Image: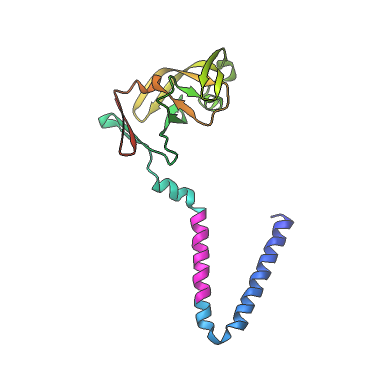
Amino acid sequence: MSSFEIGNLIYLVLLAAVLAMWVFVEKRQSLSTTLKQIAAWVLIFIGAIAAVGLWGDIRQTVLPQQAVFAETGRIELPRAPDGHYYVTLDVNGAPIRFVVDTGATSVVISQDDARLAGLSDEDMVFFSEAMTANGRVKTAPVTLQSVSIGPFEDRDVRAYVNGGAMRESLLGMSYLNRFSRLEITGGKLVLER
């Protein structure tokens, strides 16, 4: 803890002590009622702090997750709050999150995701170009040795590494065509093999 943080803590403790003394002196006639009210506010405050601290865990529990049904060859992806469908695939053994993009011709991964999947800078030779919503970008054609979700695994998947900035890697039609059915129903994207 820095001296600045210690000073802030001392200030807050003194302020709380002064407020507590004022409440005690002002309300000494009805002290039991005042103590009950203070206890209620303390519990509300602690509950609010706990909710803020646990919000990430609560959100993960409440929001639906992608589901793989191996016996029926079905994958269900829930619609995210931003309206897109996301899927996490194991690419060369590394989990990579993709936005499902039926408007993209190919699988396009960011440079960071390419490195996460084990591709080196020498593997990424940016000699081709692609036209994107952000304009023309350099791309590097690569082959992903393994792309899998649950029991479904594809080998030697062609993809492109985007030479520009990307927030999310794109799962385009060259991969989606491996599924026999692609349907959006009930707020879910359903893929079947």
The residue shown at (48%, 48%) is: 56
**How far across and down, in percent of the image, does residue 177 sit?**
35, 20
Quarter in which the C terminus is drawn: top left
**How far across and down, in percent of the image, does residue 73 sit?**
28, 29
Q: Residue furthest top?
A: 127
In this view, 188 is above or below 45? above
**How far across and down, in percent of the image, does residue 71 sit?**
26, 31
Q: Which residues are magenta?
A: 37-52
Secondary structure, magenta segment, majority class: helix
The coloring applied to the image is rainbow
Residue 40 falls inside the magenta stretch: yes
Q: Tell which of 135 and 108 is nearer to you.
A: 135
Q: Quadrant of residue 8?
A: bottom right
Residue 24 falls inside the magenta stretch: no
The residue shown at (45%, 39%) is: 82
Q: Residue furthest left?
A: 72
Total labels drawn = 0
Q: Tell which of 146 and 109 is nearer to you.
A: 109
Q: Tell which of 120 and 133 is nearer to you.
A: 133
Q: Residue furthest right?
A: 3
The residue shown at (59%, 19%) is: 121
Q: Quadrant of residue 78?
A: top left
**How far across and down, in percent of the image, does residue 173 sit?**
39, 21
The answer to whether 36 appears left or right of 192 in the picture is right
The answer to whether 178 appears left or right of 135 in the picture is left
In this view, 167 is above or below 26? above
Q: Tell which of 14 and 30 is nearer to you.
A: 30
The residue shown at (51%, 55%) is: 52
Q: Quadrant of residue 179?
A: top left
Quarter in which the N terminus is drawn: bottom right
